[in-house]
Amino acid sequence: MKSLQWLGLPSLSLSAAVFYGCLLPSAEAKSSVISPKFVILSMFSDEGGSWYGIPEFNVLEKNYTLPGLSPVYPDLHCTADGEICQLTTGEGESNAAVSVATLAFSPLFNFTQTYFMIAGIAGINPKVASVGSVTFARYAVHVGLQYEIDAREIPKNWTTGYFAQDSEQPGQFPGALYGTEVYEVNEALRQKAFAVAKTAKLSDSPDSTPLRANYSKNPEYKAGSEAANVYLCDTATSDTYWDGDLLGVAFEGTVSVFTGGKGVYCSTQQEDNATLQALLRAAIANRVDFSRIIIMRTASDFDREFPGQSVVASLLGPEPGYDDSIANIHIAGVKIVEMVLDGWESEFKKGIQATNYVGDVFGSLGGKPDFIPKATSKRRGYSRRR
Ligand SMILES: *[C@@H]1O[C@H](CO)[C@@H](O)[C@H](O)[C@H]1NC(C)=O
Ligand SMILES: *[C@@H]1O[C@H](CO)[C@@H](O)[C@H](O)[C@H]1NC(C)=O
Ligand SMILES: *[C@@H]1O[C@H](CO)[C@@H](O)[C@H](O)[C@H]1NC(C)=O
Ligand SMILES: *[C@@H]1O[C@H](CO)[C@@H](O)[C@H](O)[C@H]1NC(C)=O
């Protein structure tokens, strides 16, 4: 256990301090509460490592061991002044949901003005971007949260075995919602993040050139054959790590259907809707501001095969864009951290007014989701048909 010099209680273990903190008179407890301006959320060690040993700031100056975080990544890392913190959540939906909830509900922190940036790598749709690219999502869609029947057993006129819960076939909006299907984040903040990330000089190794050349054989994959760049496009979550054109096209469809045709599927990952669910619950409890969330995913590998390649080879094959995707988390992401800290007093402390709907499919934070098709919105909340 790390000692807690910051509480002036160097000899206490953290769990004792948490307990003690609950019993402290509130004025004293408040003075020890840390209010970070920026929290970076990484999912595994290489993503976290992108932020260590960098020239701009040192998040390894203070470590806070929080009971409830992943046993593999038990510490929240922060700069000495507590302004910038970084957490590695562990991979997959459950790790992300539990670690982020643990952090967001910790009484040791005040996150009401904190900017949270999901900063991880992802698979990439070659119709939208290439490996090494940096993407910013407005919509995070949980494509794994659906009915599935094995593709070998689907009706003749279906193109996929995935279809929304309480719907009758692919292409229909879910009839029953769990609430974690779609999240929408602050578009004005996304545009600002995109604009500063565009000023970064991305890492883009020539090792990716032969792979990109193979994608150029399909004109639909023109973007995939080009150099790394910065994009505005949406992200899809599932615990299942999928690959291949058929699932790629199926999930392009899911993202489109779940967002009322507004979302553009480009990046694929295993955590974001879980992370957003944890932050949403903390926002309902007034512990975080849901309009201060940025979803940045950098592209490590393609989500589907190039013409002539087998899907298994695509999934298991070399990932020449991997190192660039890790490097670009810091290269593009640090511009966003600096934007928020440098502009804190003038702009970011009070927040960037969202002009779009922000929140989940239920409208839990108020407002009405702008992506639910009118014809189906009445069916929201129906119980599962069984
Ligand atoms: C914080 O933890 C990291 C490893 O996770 C370590 O390298 C660093 O030295 C620690 N910092 C302090 C102040 O103990
Ligand atoms: C958290 O910080 C905000 C902004 O400084 C402040 O208004 C609020 O009272 C703080 N909340 C707690 C519980 O300390
Ligand atoms: C498949 O065919 C059935 C029967 O003709 C039809 O009702 C259904 O809409 C079709 N579904 C798709 C996805 O084309
Ligand atoms: C590109 O495709 C060719 C032909 O299928 C293959 O031999 C080669 O290994 C591929 N290159 C990469 C980097 O995947």
Image (cartoon, rainbow, N blue to C red):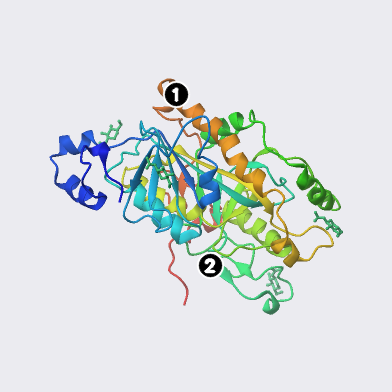
Question: In the rendered image, which quarter is residue 325 located in?
Answer: top right
Of residues 224 and 13, the one nearer the viewer is 13
Quarter of the image where ligand 2 sits = top left
Q: 53 or 116, which lies in front?
A: 53
Spatial CA distance of label 2 from label 1 is 42 Å
Label 1 neighbourhood size at 10 Å, few (<14), some (14-19), many (20+)? few
**Residue type, mark 2 in image:** Gln
Q: Is residue 325 rendered to the left or right of residue 30?
A: right
Task: Please provide percent x and percent y for residue 56.
Answer: 51, 29
Q: Earlier in the sequence, mark 2 or mark 1?
A: 2
| Observer able to see residue 365 | no
Left or right of 9? Residue 154 is right
339 to 253, vertically: above or below: above
Q: Quarter-wise, where is residue 307 in the image?
A: bottom right
User: Marks 2 and 1: which is nearer the front?
Assistant: 1
Asked which secondary structure carries label 2, the reply is loop
The crowd level at tag 2 (other Cα within 10 Å; few <14, some 14-19, many 20+) is many
Helix, strand or loop for disc 1: helix
2 and 1 marks in contact (CB < 8 Å):
no
* Residue 150 shows up from this direction: yes
How far from the left and from the top, in percent, is residue 64?
Answer: 34, 45
**Image coords of residue 320 (percent x, y):** 72, 50
The numbered disc on residue 218 is none
Q: Which residue is mark 2?
A: 165
Name the kind of residue labelled 1 in the image. Answer: Glu
Q: How many marks?
A: 2
Please name the residue shown 44% across and 23% down the image: 347
Q: Seen from this angle, which residue lies furthest bottom?
A: 153
Q: Is the C-beta of the residue carrying label 2 under 8 Å from the nearest atom of ligand 3? A: no
Q: Which mark is residue 347?
A: 1
